[in-house]
Amino acid sequence: MSQYEVTIGIPVYNIERYVARAIESALGQTFESIEILVLDDCGTDGSMDIVRRYQRSHPRGCHIRVVRQPENMGLGQARNRIVAEARGRYLYHLDGDDAIAPDTIALLHAEMVRHQAQLVYGSYKRVYEDGSTPPRQCVYPYRVFTQQGEFASFVYQRYDALQANTWNFLIDIRVYRDNHIGHQPVNFWEDFTFTMDLPTYVTRVVMLPSVTYIYYMRANTLSNTQHRTHIDKAEIQATIHAMQAVKDASSRISGQTYFPMRMYKVMLTCFYVVCSILRHRAVISPAFTPREIRDVMASPLSLAEVLRLRRWRLRNLALYALSVMPPRLSVACMWAAARARHLI
């Protein structure tokens, strides 16, 4: 039996300016049975001093538990350690520079119990550092999924049907542990590589329009590259490697009706990785060669397998073609397509 009903997992690495906001929002939950599991990823600032101050002084501080990595291992591995260490029946990921509404866990947990769900998503809002908000926010429709493959079909049918975030959902910890699934050991787009496969492991899912999470958009972070003056090629290569793991997992679900849609979404994401490389080419060092850029689009399917797809065949074929063109022609085509879609 779990010691807590819910674990809130918070990875912490060099976020001294922001961590108090996250910890206070976790401690301020109206829901009672919560473990706050802080993953110390061996930063060099005073973030953990702040966490320990809350441990000592806050009325709920005894429910803060700190687990330290042996060395800095990055966000993907931090999330995996949180999964391994969590004592709650359900798990909620909160990034250490964001915050959640006071009733977040209460709302998500109530829906979890009401529908005997494996996974419940809340909506979220984006906030810039100056306090302003972008016009478009992430608000889901109220949806309840109960049939095998229903949620996966919904997610894969439209690219933005589900945001690629590893936070702001309450998940039955058994989904992780029974299926031996985890997060890729990368810092950038680790959310996507996990959320791409998660729908294939769950059946009973709820999506809520209630805004339960506040995502603070900071400059010069891994997820906010537009202001960076240098991007290490190895950082992007790690993401490409993680995407390859997603491709390699395709055979597990090749017989599912949603497989062609999932395949298209995976390969379209590879195209977006290429767009990011092309957009930031001037600040990526060392540079990517045309062949390396084209090979991002390498498909796990053969031409014969693409042609046998019963649905979304032409879309998948168009992306497959980019992987077999001569490198410079492929890059030129992707550049033109990206410009036409205002991605560059």
Image: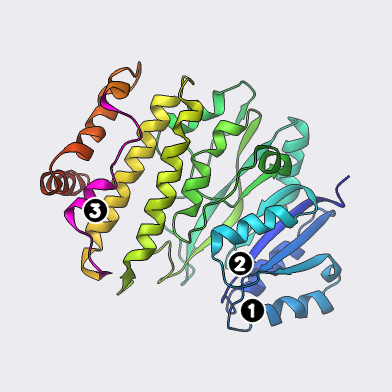
Q: Is 59 on the left or on the right of 204, as rendered?
A: right
Q: Earlier in the sequence, mark 3 or mark 2?
A: 2
Amino acid bearing label 1: Ser
Q: Is residue 80 visible?
A: yes
Q: Which residue is mark 1?
A: 47
**CA distance separating discs 1 and 3:** 39 Å
Q: Where does the magenta region start and end? A: 284-303
Amino acid bearing label 3: Glu
Residue placed most toward the observer, 129 or 5:
5
> Which label is found at residue 110?
none
Q: Is residue 288 magenta?
A: yes
Q: Which residue is mark 2?
A: 96
Figure quadrant of residue 320: top left
Residue at 20% across / 33% down in the picture? 321
- How crowded pointer 3 is (Cα within 10 Å; few <14, some 14-19, many 20+) is rated as some
Q: Is residue 240 magenta?
A: no
**CA distance separating discs 3 and 2:** 34 Å
| In the image, residue 86 above or below residue 306 | below
